[in-house]
Amino acid sequence: MIIRLAQERDFPGFLRLAAQVEHWFGPMVEEPGFHRAVRGRIRRSAALVAETSEIVGGMLFSAEPPVRRVHWLVVSGRARGSGVGRALLTEAMRRFGPDPGTIEVITFGPDHPGAVDSGARTFYERLGFAPAEPADPGPEGGSRQVYRRAFPGPVVESAPEPDNVAVRPPGVDMHGPES
């Protein structure tokens, strides 16, 4: 698996991932606002993909201190539990720079069906995030909660890094140079 900066050609992969989780998050695939958000993050080098023979994970983030944000992190249903999400988050944290602060993500509230079905809350807790204040409901009406952790700091999860994860440095891409 390769973790790399997303490029415009990866946009259809983001839509395929979004289609897998719309039942938890509400409409995205046909939403112009989601399209603008993905393309904007790609242009600002604030989007990552995890790639095998296809895109199996995607992440949108902002790296401005003191509060860095994970705006969207989705792993393909077939790849969940294989270290893809952790690899994406670890690479984003590498890109956050040296200034201390916090990392925030808004995920499912405790009563949202996706809280259990997706494993998102457990995923973030294993990586050192702690539940904080409630957030506004999602577009589908489900509850949301802010999760937060200090930055910098090591990823807490005790599981070893999968040996099949490689991070592709900027400008090195199996499809040609990044633009």
Image (cartoon, grey):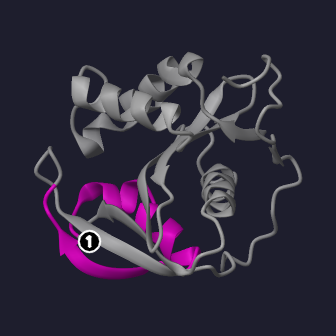
Label 1: few (<14), some (14–19) or many (≥20) C-alpha neighbours in 10 Å: some
Kindly state the secondary structure of the residue where label 1 is placed. Answer: loop
Q: Which residue reaches farthest right? A: 163
Q: Mark 1 points at which residue?
A: 110
Where is residue 71 drawn, in percent x and y?
39, 52
Q: In the figure, 104 relative to 132: above or below?
A: above
Q: Which of 171 and 6 is in front in this view?
A: 171
**Based on the displayed image, in which of its 4 quarters is residue 92 positioned?**
bottom right
From what the image shows, is residue 62 above or below residue 40?
A: below
Instruction: Name the spot of residue 102 as percent of width and height, x first.
Output: 47, 77
In the rendered image, residue 49 lying in the magenta stretch gets the answer: no
Of all residues shown, which one is farthest toward the left? Answer: 141
Magenta range is 111-137
Q: Would residue 26 be visible to someone looking at this image?
A: yes
Residue 2 shown left or right of residue 90 in the figure: right
The quadrant in which the C terminus is found is: top right
145 relative to 54, above or below: below
Q: Which residue is drawn at 48% across and 80% down?
A: 149
Identity of the residue drawn at 33% across and 25% down: 35
Given residues 44 and 23, the one toward you in this image is: 44
Q: In which quarter of the image is the N terminus?
A: top right
Where is residue 138 shown, x and y percent of the image? Answer: 18, 52
In the drawing, does residue 72 fall left or right of residue 169? Answer: left
Whether residue 31 is visible to the viewer of this picture, yes or no, is no
**96 up-or-down from 71: above or below:** below
The quarter of the picture where residue 50 lies is top right
Q: What residue type is labelled 1?
A: Pro
